[in-house]
Image: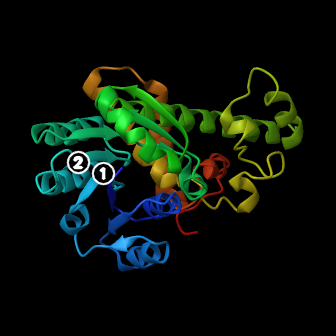
Amino acid sequence: MGNIAFIGLGNMGNPMAANLVKAGLSVSGFDLVQDNLDEARSAGVTIADSGRQAVEGAGIVITMLPAGAHVVSVYSELVPAADPGTLFIDCSTIDVESARRAHKLAADHQMLSVDAPVSGGVGGAAAGTLTFMAGGSKEAFEQAEPILDPMAGRIVHCGDAAAGQAAKICNNMILGISMIGVGEAFVLAEKLGLSHQALFDVASTSSGQCWSINTYCPVPGPVPTSPANNDYKPGFAAALMLKDLKLAQEAAQSSGAVTPLGASAMQLYALFNAAGGEATDFSGIINFLRGQVKKDE
């Protein structure tokens, strides 16, 4: 299987790399933040002085970075420095065009590559239960799948280059829209004197059921594990939801797709973030819908 270089050891990258180490794999990591390096070292990751050093002798390079520009920059530097036949796997959530550019950089140097963004948040990363949405050739996916397995609960091959990113932004557009709809319904129920539990008992077992209510209900009580029961501390922060909704709108505009609900969801999450909600869980938008989030809080 070969050594693994892991570039980007932040909130998601560190537990992902740790699970690779737990699976008995040799991982060399690099990040620009010293605290991230210290945490990775404590999990058994060998710390490199640079990205180039991390990829020396690696058969697989995994990246988990904030944005498309970072991925393209890292690929531009590391793909030419990697050994022939190195497999590149990008697990970042980025725009489709940047994902395609990263794939092309790899292909230009005869390297296989996979875009494999994830769903499941920090909790899923720590538990090794992430869902990976993979894009790339069949050959690249077959090589990537056993590498992803120690970090995964589910791995889906979505199609060719950038198909994983396309699936991720479409999924999260659905999620953003549905959470607003669920939040609006609970706010309306409150105004009408209907209890949270009564609405949940009806909607979660009838035509209103969806992940945003059944698994991640945005009010305290009905789903004890939801962030609503922990002061909306993020599993998935509102700032990240806004990022993904913006990526979806960029893709919609470039492809000519009509997504009015996606556009509205992006606008509402932008307002929620601007009002001080960016560091709270995205389900906390229900408080914005109630008029309870203020910028000075």
Q: Position of residue 214 (x, y in %)?
A: 74, 36
**Label at residue 86:** 2
Tell me the quarter of the picture where residue 55 sits: bottom left
Q: Position of residue 32 (x, y in %)?
A: 29, 72
Q: Position of residue 85 (x, y in %)?
A: 20, 44
Question: Which of 243 and 151 lies nearest the eye of the viewer?
Answer: 151
Question: How packed is label 1: few (under 14 Cα within 10 Å), some, or many (20 or more)?
Answer: many
Q: Position of residue 256 (x, y in %)?
A: 29, 20
Q: Please, is residue 67 above or below residue 206 in the view?
A: below
Q: For the residues marked 2 and 1, what is the alpha-carbon distance in whole angstroms? A: 5 Å
Tell me the quarter of the picture where residue 114 sits: top left
Tell me the quarter of the picture where residue 108 sits: top left
Amino acid beneath label 2? Thr
Q: Please, is residue 273 above or below residue 178 in the view?
A: below
Regarding residue 195, the answer to whether it shows in the image is no
Q: Please state the total of marks drawn on the protein image.
A: 2
Q: The residue tagged with tag 1: helix, strand or loop?
A: strand
Q: Residue at x 19, y 51 (%)?
A: 75
| Quadrant that contains the C terminus | bottom right
Amino acid beneath label 1? Ile
